[in-house]
Amino acid sequence: MKGILKEELDRAFHTPRFIIVIVLALAIFIVGVYRSPFAFFSQEMHPVNCLLLNLEYGDFGFLATLMATLPFADSFLDDLNQGFLRQIVQRVPYKRYQWAKILAVALSGGFCLALAVLLIFLVSLMGAADWKSVAYFSGYAHSPTEPAGPFGSIYTLNPVYYLFYILFSTFGFGAVYAVLGLAISSLIHNRYVVLAGPLVLVQILDFLEDRSLHVTDAFNLLNGLLPFESSVFPSADFTVGVQLVQFVVVLAISVSAFLMLTRKQRLTF
């Protein structure tokens, strides 16, 4: 397992596609600064608050699934189409390859989104930062005193603690939906569908919740990424328990589908 896992991780983290992710993160920051209702260079606020505004107004939620799947989610198709899979099964047990692929895809997707958030946070430090402030500024007409969703009260104690929670959320979201892309690749052998499939699913449920079409906060998968946008005010519908259930359910379905659809009996090497 260690040998094939090391090989998969090396392939996952040594890809020029991370440059695209960095470019997209910087684009999110620029769009967020432009669209934010607060002046970036004159409105003093905590850098974490500036980060949240950038994620919200820079449409991070729209690009997040694409950024998570971009590095390595379509790698199974490369292995299958380029004959690499035939060589793998001759050297290691096939189950090891499957699990190594899942782990590598998950880690690359999670790392990718966490890296993007950290980069946006670091660039946000160029603004009018006030590290002592615990005031929370949002774009809502009746601004809440703390971020919505789980652990909003942590922000008022120390916004940096809340940053760790956001990093956990983005890493978990990236890992889960990268594996979802991997599962799609085992069903539909088209890399564009692999990259866009999770994005379409997440955006459809977000649209339905926005239109109140029988989809609550708990069923909006995008709230797992941006919990502070789960409602205008803190909601009992979306808790950290619901967030974890979202991650576990989607991950379990994705892993099961990948293992089942990539059985050697179904593939011609």
Image (tube, helix red, strand yellow):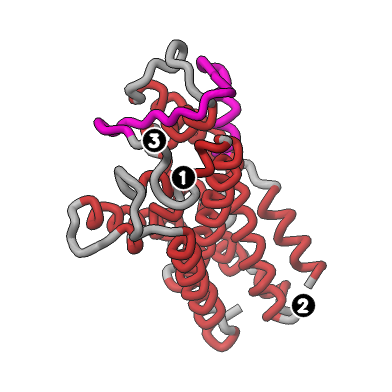
Residue 137 spot, x, y in % from top left: 39, 28
Residue 171 spot, x, y in % from top left: 57, 52
| Lateral position of residue 106 relative to residue 65, left or right | right
Residue at the image point whose x is 65% and y is 71% from the top: 85
Disc with the residue nearer the chain's start (3 vs 1)? 3
Q: Which mark is residue 145?
A: 3
What is the quadrant of residue 106 in the picture? bottom right
| Lateral position of residue 197 relative to residue 79, left or right | left
Q: How crowded is the residue under tag 3: few (<14 C-alpha within 10 Å), some, or many (20+)?
A: some
Residue type at mark 1 is Gly
Q: Is residue 135 a member of the stretch shown in magenta?
A: yes
Disc with the residue nearer the chain's start (2 vs 3)? 2
Q: Main secondary structure of the magenta part?
A: loop
Q: Indicate the quadrant containing the C terminus: top left, top right, bottom left or bottom right.
A: bottom right
Identify the residue under disc 2: 92
Can you say whether 147 is above or below 259 in the image? above
Residue type at mark 2 is Val
Identify the residue under disc 1: 152
Say if mark 2 contacts mark 1, CB within 8 Å. no
- Of badges 2 and 1, nearer the viewer stands 1
Nearest the eye: 191 or 67:
67
Residue lying at the far bottom of the rendered structure: 265
Element type at marker 1? helix
Residue type at mark 3 is Thr
Element type at marker 3? loop
Disc with the residue nearer the chain's start (2 vs 1)? 2
Marks 3/1: CA–CA distance = 9 Å
Q: Which residues are magenta?
A: 116-143
Can you say whether 192 is above or below 4 in the image? above
